[in-house]
Amino acid sequence: MTSDTDVPRGTSLPENSPAATGVEPQSAAIPSPAIESPLLQAVATAVSLKSGNFKLPVPAETRILCVANQKGGVGKTTSTVNIAAALAFGGLQVLVIDLDPQGNASTAFSVDHHTGTPGTYEVVVDQAPIADVVAETAIPGLVCVPATLDLAGAETELVSAVAREQRLRKAISAYAEARAEAGSRLDYILIDCPPSLGLLTVNALTAAQQVLLPIQCEFYALEGVSQLLKIVDLVGRELNPGLTVGQILLTMFDARTRLSQQVAEDVRTHFAEQVLNSVVPRSVRVSEAPSFGQTVVEYDPGSSGSQAYIEAARELAERMAS
Ligand code: ADP
Ligand code: MG
């Protein structure tokens, strides 16, 4: 995938630069303050991230978010790992649960997830404690429960299981309690869902307080969203009172296309303030980071994709602090 919304590694992209907007400036000779300021801001964020000066508000209690959309390829995993990374760089304690047999979140964190590695399958099927399967990542404060292909069998194995929708919720509350007692309370738990509305996703919806819904700025973006909203409503009535779609994140925005702008406008009209202001641009840096076993926040902190995820994490943390 190529895009000219990217800049070389180690440089930063101002929001209103030609590369970001696809619009050539009338004069590129002298950078105006309006161009310079987002550039400086991007550099400053990247520097403060590296130096540990980037701080996000600590929530009043552990927040549990389920990143769901039954459409595949809309940016669930990318959003999970990058928001999680930004929250952790912001000084927060974060757990990511990879609930997709593809194990893409585990790959992004460079966490071992070959078949047979204990992970989410053991938690939901064998009721193994999360503490026994959780893995450290390269990011301080961020741990991950890996997913292996074994998890693909869990959907059918859970069908006849006792309290089959509650497996993840119970495991999470036991682990969260243990962490709090040990003096290292978790601030955020992010669950990366598979692209389906089966029992694994229902387990995530039952465990979470809120859904974070990534919507790709592409054709058919809203297809299936109403089905997800119905499931959220059902789980909210039957299994997990209070569950809501809390935040919506627009992903893979391409400023050069009218379609991206139209989708973004439609989503904002429909969902209003649920939609985060930060919009993630389509960016090569974002898509190549996982092949280095990294999030884009680590791989190229000053890039437009990284900046968007850092801003999204900041908004989320501010909205969810109290
Ligand atoms: P999902 O988890 O919903 O299936 P992913 O997060 O795996 O979606 O994203 C699908 C594909 O799109 C991946 O190859 C990913 O690298 C790529 N991708 C995601 N977000 C972006 C982005 N902002 N710019 C470019 N590519 C992206
Ligand atoms: Mg995924």
Image (cartoon, rainbow, N blue to C red):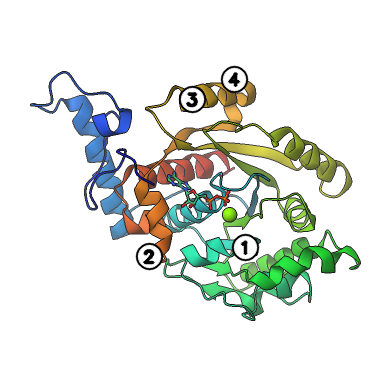
What percent of the width, then of the height, locates residue 170?
78, 65
- Label 3 near label 2: C-beta < 8 Å? no
Which numbered disc, 2 or 1, marks the residue that appears first in the sequence? Answer: 1
Q: CA distance from mark 1 to mark 4?
A: 32 Å
In the displayed structure, 260 sits above or below 202; it is above
Q: In this orientation, does residue 68 appear?
A: yes
Q: CA distance from mark 3 to mark 4?
A: 15 Å
Kindly identify the amino acid type of the residue bearing the numbered disc 4.
Answer: Thr
The residue carrying mark 2 is 292
- Identify the image quadrant of residue 242: top right
Disc 1 secondary structure class: strand
In the displayed structure, 140 sits above or below 84; it is below
Kindly identify the amino acid type of the residue bearing the numbered disc 2.
Answer: Phe
Nearer the camera: disc 2 or disc 4: 2
Which numbered disc, 1 or 4, marks the residue that appears first in the sequence? Answer: 1
Nearer the camera: disc 2 or disc 1: 2
The residue carrying mark 3 is 259
Relative placement, left or right, of 95 versus 176 is left
What percent of the width, then of the height, locates residue 84?
50, 55
Ligand 2, image quadrant it occupies = bottom right
